[in-house]
Image: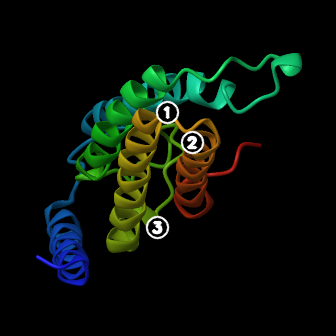
């Protein structure tokens, strides 16, 4: 299959998947159900953060608390981040928007723009695959760029779908 055809197939699959997520999102039945869903999402994102932190430290100067680049750690953690990113949309199949009294950073746009939300998770997964692949090549500069690019995909999702800290 030619590259252009693969991109089209992947894009079509992402659209179908996003529509499926949007259609399967059901409102939480109670505050207790919403709380369980929110806590599960929060744990998932804590795992993402803990998995990314060593990679972020490798981008900092050593004199500023940074760590030496370890391509094996990058490859391992990026592979795990790809798995975690792919699981993000499934963490939002319970729509908790109506329960405003429960603390969450999830914005209503997650459910209102499910296709865009899914696309952002897919972008993170793709960036993680790239980071793992580049790390395995041993190219330090390209690996650092791939880590930074992966971090940008996280930020792109936060811009639209995560409430800003006060």
Give percent across and percent down for residue 120.
43, 62
Where, by quadrant of the figure, is residue 144 drawn? top right
Q: Is residue 124 above or below residue 69?
A: below
Disc 1: which residue: 138
**Could you say whether the residue bearing mark 1 is in a helix, strand or loop?**
loop
In three-dimensional space, the C-alpha distance between marks 1 and 2, rounded to whole angstroms, equals 13 Å
**Could you say whether the residue bearing mark 3 is in a helix, strand or loop?**
helix
Give percent across and percent down for residue 36.
29, 31
**Could you say whether the residue bearing mark 2 is in a helix, strand or loop?**
helix
Where, by quadrant of the figure, is residue 123 drawn? bottom left
The crowd level at tag 3 (other Cα within 10 Å; few <14, some 14-19, many 20+) is: some
Which image quadrant: the C terminus?
A: top right
Determine whether, in the image, residue 68 is placed left or right of residue 77: right
Give percent across and percent down for residue 46.
47, 26
Taking depth in this image into account, of 135 and 77 the one nearest to the observer is 135
Determine whether, in the image, residue 6 is placed left or right of residue 45: left
Q: Which residue does the image show at 33% across and 34% down from the upper left?
A: 79
User: Sequence order check: which comes first, mark 1 or mark 3?
Assistant: 3
User: Sequence order check: which comes first, mark 1 or mark 2?
Assistant: 1
In three-dimensional space, the C-alpha distance between marks 1 and 3, rounded to whole angstroms, equals 39 Å
Give percent across and percent down for residue 111.
35, 65
Its colouring scheme is rainbow
Residue 109's label in the rendered image is 3
Which image quadrant: the N terminus?
A: bottom left
Disc 2: which residue: 147
Circles 1 and 3 in contact, beta carbons < 8 Å: no
């Amino acid at each position: 299959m030619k590259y252009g055809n693969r991109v089209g197939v992947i894009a079509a699959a992402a659209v179908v998947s996003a529509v499926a997520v949007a259609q399967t999102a059901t409102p939480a039945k109670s505050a207790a159900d919403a709380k369980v869903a929110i806590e599960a999402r929060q744990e998932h994102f804590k795992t993402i953060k803990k998995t990314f932190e060593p990679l972020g430290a490798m981008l900092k100067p050593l004199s500023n608390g940074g760590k030496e680049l370890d391509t094996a750690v990058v490859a391992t953690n990026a592979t795990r981040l790809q798995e975690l990113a792919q699981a993000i949309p499934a963490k939002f199949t319970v729509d908790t928007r109506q329960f405003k009294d429960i603390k969450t950073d999830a914005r209503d746009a997650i459910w209102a723009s499910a296709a865009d939300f899914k696309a952002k998770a897919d972008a993170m997964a793709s960036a993680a695959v790239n980071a793992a692949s580049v790390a395995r090549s041993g190219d330090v500069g390209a690996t650092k760029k791939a880590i930074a690019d992966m971090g940008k995909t996280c930020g792109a999702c936060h811009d639209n779908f995560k409430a800003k800290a006060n």
